[in-house]
Image (cartoon, rainbow, N blue to C red):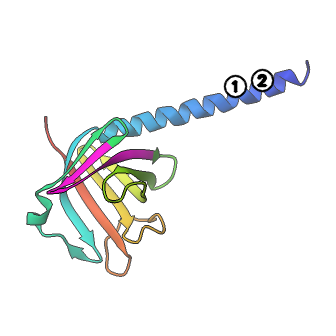
Amino acid sequence: MKNFIPVALLVVGSLAVLAAETDADKKEIEKWQGTWRAVSMVHEGKETPAEKLKPIKLTVEGANYKFENGEFHEQGTYRFDPSQEPKALDIVVGEGPDKDKVYLVIYKVEGDELTICLESDNKHRPTEFTGAEGTGCVLEVWKREKK
């Protein structure tokens, strides 16, 4: 019986940590809700022309996303890790040409502006927000559409 109490406290403590992580994930998911339009994309120091950004749209419902760019469509889920700095996100492609691929991303959400960064070769998660030449990174800025 003496061993039961420490084990019970360990289990209860572990559940509390899991609940806190779930709450943090829910708060992050809430920040992403809605429809987003790409306003800037920089890869290897080259800015994507505004005309090419116009058809790009991202819709987020819960932890699910749908990405559209003209004829190209993709959907999947997000796995958030807001405990890292910068915050980390895995984009898990569920449908589309890249099905089952997992993109390693960092992100920040400031009001109605979303910034994400990923390496184009997707071998490592970036450690800073940059799209500068020589980094291999793509830096994207999105604005949430008003309802």
Give the residue at x 23% y 65%: 41
Q: Which residue is mark 1?
A: 12
Quadrant location, the C terminus: top left
Residue 138's disc is none
Quadrant location, the N terminus: top right
Residue 28: name its quadrant: top left
Q: Which residue is mark 2?
A: 8
Give the residue at x 83% y 21%: 5
Q: Which residues are magenta?
A: 65-79
**Residue 140 in the image: above or below residue 62:** below
Q: How many marks?
A: 2
Amino acid at the residue labelled 1: Val
* Horizontal arrangement in the rendering, residue 15 relative to residue 96 (left or right): right
Whether residues under marks 2 and 1 lie with C-beta atoms below 8 angstroms apart, the answer is yes
Horizontal and vertical percent position of residue 36: 21, 47
Spatial CA span between label 2 and label 1:
6 Å
Q: Please, what secondary structure does the residue beneath circle 2 have?
A: helix
Residue farthest to the bottom? 134
Give the residue at x 25% y 69%: 42
Q: Please, what secondary structure does the residue beneath circle 1 have?
A: helix
Amino acid at the residue labelled 2: Ala
Of 59 and 82, nearer the camera is: 59
**Residue 6 in the image: above or below residue 113:** above
Horizontal and vertical percent position of residue 55: 12, 56
Of 144 and 103, nearer the camera is: 103
* Horizontal arrangement in the rendering, residue 13 relative to residue 35 (left or right): right
Q: Is the magenta region chiefly helix, strand or loop?
A: strand
Horizontal and vertical percent position of residue 4: 85, 22
Give the residue at x 75% y 30%: 10
* Horizontal arrangement in the rendering, residue 106 relative to residue 48 (left or right): right
Q: Mark 2 Cα within 10 Å, few/some/many (few <14, many 20+)?
A: few
